[in-house]
Image (cartoon, grey):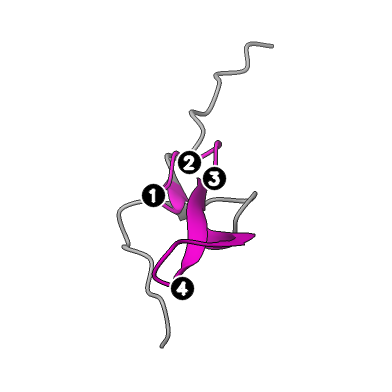
Amino acid sequence: MPQHVPASGHVCPDCDGFASAKVTSGGRDRHGHLLTITARCITCRGTGTIRPARRREVFA
């Protein structure tokens, strides 16, 4: 399924818009389900977008 990034910001350069992923820890619980953790991008805090950088004024 394609993932769409909202037009309100720019795509995060670290995660390319895929801000979180499920990672298996290799173990199983007593019901046989895989144990997973959610890893989130620390740059965009799990949103997939960042605010555009502010432009600095250059004085000559």
Residue 44 image label: 2
Disc 3 crowd, CA 10 A, few/some/many (<14, 14-19, 20+): some
CB of mark 2 within 8 Å of CB of mark 3?
yes
In the image, 31: left or right of 24?
left
Q: What is the C-alpha distance between the residues marked 3 and 4?
A: 29 Å
Instruction: Look at mark 3 in the image and give the residue it sits on.
Output: 41
- Asked if disc 2 and disc 4 are in contact, CB closer than 8 Å, the reply is no
Q: Does the magenta stretch include residue 32?
A: yes
Q: What stretch is highlighted in magenta?
A: 20-49
Specify which label sits upstream in the sequence, 2 or 4.
4
Residue 30 picture location, percent across and down: 43, 63
Judging by the rendered image, the residue that carries numbered circle 4 is 32
Q: Which residue is drawn at 48% across and 41% down?
A: 44
Q: At x 60% / y 55%, what residue is drawn?
A: 15
SS category of the residue bearing label 2: loop
**Which of marks 1 and 3 precedes in the sequence?**
3
Tell me the distance, in whole angstroms, between the alpha carbons under discs 2 and 4: 34 Å
Left or right relative to 18: residue 9: left
